[in-house]
């Protein structure tokens, strides 16, 4: 077989395979899926459908992926904190048609993500409940319970991982803090404050790329890890986030209420420790607060 025919042959083999297969682009839009994937997840690639939209549809219809969550947005936030962050990962998943699959996700050099699933329903399931309980406990230990983002421990682990991988460079990091958050809690109550924190988490996910790391590291402070982004590109991403926050109105009972955030953005230097990098980001964030808030202060190192 000539090399020129290999791509068509590979595509044809995936099309004919009973195992679900799909490709998502760097923006997590479903670009191609074989018949088995379309039938399993009740979707059709149209050039616009994102992975998040696919999961929302599955959750709403009770078809496709089994999603055991009352709050789909919190589930999406938690899952997005893991999706596409490693070159390869694999995990068990359930489909509503009763199948049990082993799903693998591989991030390609251009940022696209390939999903391949194998039906493992016939395998012995003696230890499955134990594995599922372990996986659930591990996810809980890595997740902020309120926002669904990575928690402080997981966020710092993601940062250490990015600093050690040459593929992640240039690398930028931002610390973000909600402006006057104490006043929100004091005037509107902690329940409203929690809604604002959850809204900010949604704005982070909507503003960033799949490969970016998003974590809540304490109170109203968040960490954003931006691999393969120099200071200029990283600044565009953070500015987009601040713009979304300015437009957001997260409280249905207070339709005029809005909030703001400040950011300290730094570009990492090779060999720099995570502690020093975060100190620089924190200093930049302090300058943003001192300069009037609702802004970014940058530091190229």
Image (spheres, rainbow, N blue to C red):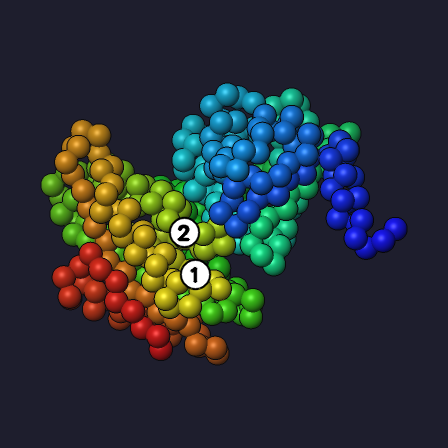
- The residue sitting at the left extreme is 187
Please name the residue shown 55% across and 47% down the image. 25
Residue beneath label 2, please? 208
Secondary structure of the residue carrying tag 1 is: strand
193 versus 98 height, above or below: below
> Where does residue 23 sit, x and y in percent of width and height?
62, 43
In which quadrant of the rendered view does residue 124 lie? top right
Q: Is 277 positioned to the left or the right of 131 in the image?
A: left
In this view of the protein, can residue 92 be seen by the observer?
A: no
Residue beneath label 1, please? 226
Q: Give yes or no for contact between labels 2 and 1 (Cβ–Cβ under 8 Å).
A: yes
Quadrant containing the C terminus in the rendered view: bottom left
Please name the residue shown 47% across and 33% down the image. 53
> Where does residue 69 sit, x and y in percent of width and height?
46, 30
Please name the residue shown 58% across and 29% down the image. 44
Q: Which numbered marker is on residue 29?
A: none
Secondary structure of the residue carrying tag 2 is: loop
In the image shown, does 68 or 9 lie closer to the viewer? 9
115 versus 99 height, above or below: below
In the image shown, does 105 or 91 lie closer to the viewer? 105
In which quadrant of the rendered view does residue 217 lie? bottom left
- The residue sitting at the right extreme is 1
> Where does residue 227 sit, x and y in percent of width and height?
47, 62
In this view of the protein, can residue 270 be seen by the observer?
A: yes
């Amino acid at each position: 077989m000539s090399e020129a025919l290999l791509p068509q042959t590979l595509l044809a083999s995936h099309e004919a395979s009973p195992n679900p297969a799909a490709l998502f682009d760097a923006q997590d839009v479903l670009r191609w899926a074989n018949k088995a994937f379309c039938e399993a997840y009740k979707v059709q690639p149209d050039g616009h459908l994102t992975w998040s939209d696919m999961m929302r549809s599955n959750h709403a219809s009770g078809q496709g992926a089994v999603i055991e969550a009352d709050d789909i947005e919190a589930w999406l936030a938690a899952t997005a904190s893991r999706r596409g962050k490693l070159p390869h990962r694999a995990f068990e998943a359930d489909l509503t048609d009763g199948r049990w699959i082993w799903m693998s996700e591989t991030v390609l050099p251009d940022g696209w993500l390939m999903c391949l699933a194998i039906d493992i329903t016939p395998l012995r399931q003696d230890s499955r409940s134990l594995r599922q309980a372990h996986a659930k406990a591990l996810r809980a230990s890595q997740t902020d319970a309120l926002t669904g983002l990575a928690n402080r421990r997981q966020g710092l682990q993601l940062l250490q991982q990015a600093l050690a991988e040459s593929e992640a460079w240039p690398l930028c990091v931002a610390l973000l803090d909600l402006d006057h958050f104490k006043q929100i809690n004091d005037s509107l109550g902690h329940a409203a404050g929690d809604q604002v924190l959850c809204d900010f988490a949604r704005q982070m996910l909507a503003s960033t790329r799949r490969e970016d790391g998003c974590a809540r590291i304490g109170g109203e402070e968040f960490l954003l890890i931006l691999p393969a982004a120099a200071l200029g590109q990283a600044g565009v991403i953070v500015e987009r986030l601040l713009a979304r926050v300015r437009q957001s109105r997260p409280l249905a009972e207070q339709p005029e209420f809005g909030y703001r955030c400040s950011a300290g953005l730094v570009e990492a230097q090779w060999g720099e420790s995570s502690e020093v990098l975060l100190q620089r980001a924190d200093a930049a964030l302090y300058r943003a607060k001192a300069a009037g808030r609702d802004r970014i202060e940058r530091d190229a190192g």
